[in-house]
Amino acid sequence: MKQNEINKWLLEVEHPAKGDKSIVELGMVEKVEIGENSVTVTLAFTKHRDPLAEYLIGSAKAAIIRNAPEGTQVEVKTIIKDEAAPKKKPGLDLGMEELENVKHIIGIASGKGGVGKSTVSVNLAVALARLGYKVGLADADVYGPSVPKMTSTEDQMPDAMQDGDKEVIMPLEKYGVKWMSIGYFAKPEQALIWRGPMACNALKQMILQVRWEELDFLLIDMPPGTGDIHISLVHDIPMEGAVIVSTPQDVALADVEKGVNMFRNESVNKPIFGLVENMAWFTPAEHPDEKYYLFGKDGGLKMAQKYDIPLLGQIPIVQSIREGGDNGEPAALSTRPDGLAFIEIAKKLAETV
């Protein structure tokens, strides 16, 4: 490996807020150190924290891993270019100022993937907005962000603005909701190769560095599972409580128990405002009075009763919900039964909170 080869690989890493120029063109690659089986790249940032720093660090590392010989150890360091700037403390220096006017911060969680958590999150946000609330949604699923696709905003880029000595990100607005996602800064086909701490830092930026302004509800679409990102979220973000999403299937409900126990663990101790049973049944359009329980019957209801959690609602398998997600038009915008089901869930959540 030679330095010019590595610089060529880093040309793939574009800064979305700088006219899609690469970090090489922008002069951000301060130093490249090549060892026998290792590469260390130092990126230089200005004295103001770049809101896309974690994204650029992860992308640079991924670009080298894709092209370097297998087994190469890759490290990406950062420095502050302006020597007159005060030394940074380790980690992100982000406060809670942008959340001061947010009344309720609620996590939308699931024990496992594939249960429709993001679909519920997006439609719940739209439903709350239709009820007259001021709503924002932060897409915290950093490895599989789906909000841009589900809201048809994937071709848009949030603006960054300078406010005194800090830089803030302006959320996108559509359907009466303010949206933020790491997906706005990464290409759809790009895999984000991030370890836990890096993902946690990127996520905090997507929440704490965003100019949310006055909100009644800020929903956080959490990644599936009960890992370090979840622990970081509940400890570092003033989350009020959570909503659990599951299907009636036994394997999904087993993971719901883990999620419930995580939020109720004494080190977390966050209330669970309710459970949403997704994919509760299937009704063919030709036979509207029939219900087919493809994943079991009332599994979510029984789980809610077992743990004394309110059942906010049961969402059937409806083709229009899937089509709405793919087309970027959430089902909650409609007056069809599926749209009204999300409105009822939103009402119950608002009353519970």
Image: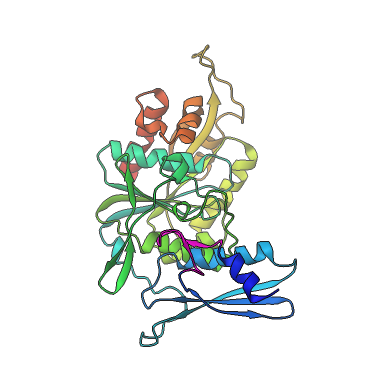
Residue 106 % position (x, y): 39, 51
Q: Position of residue 284 (x, y in %)?
A: 54, 17
Q: Is 265 inside the magenta-drawn segment?
A: no
The question of residue 21 being in magenta is answered with yes
Residue 165 x/y as whole percent: 28, 74
Q: Is residue 267 visible?
A: no
Left or right, 132 with respect to 151, comes to left
Which residue is at the front of the view, 69 or 221? 69
Vertically, is 284 above or below 143?
above
Q: Is residue 3 visible?
A: yes
Near-viewer residue (300 or 49): 49
Q: Residue furthest top?
A: 286
Q: Residue at x 40, y 23 (%)?
A: 337
Give the side of residue 4 with respect to residue 172, left or right: right
Foreground residue among 168 and 285 = 168
The main secondary structure of the magenta stretch is: loop
Write the start and end of the magenta stretch as one range. Answer: 12-25
Residue 151 x, y percent position in the rendering: 41, 40
The structure residue drawn at horizontal position 42% and vertical position 66%, both measured from the top left corner, is: 236
Which quarter of the rendered picture does the N terminus lie within?
bottom right
Q: How many marks?
A: 0
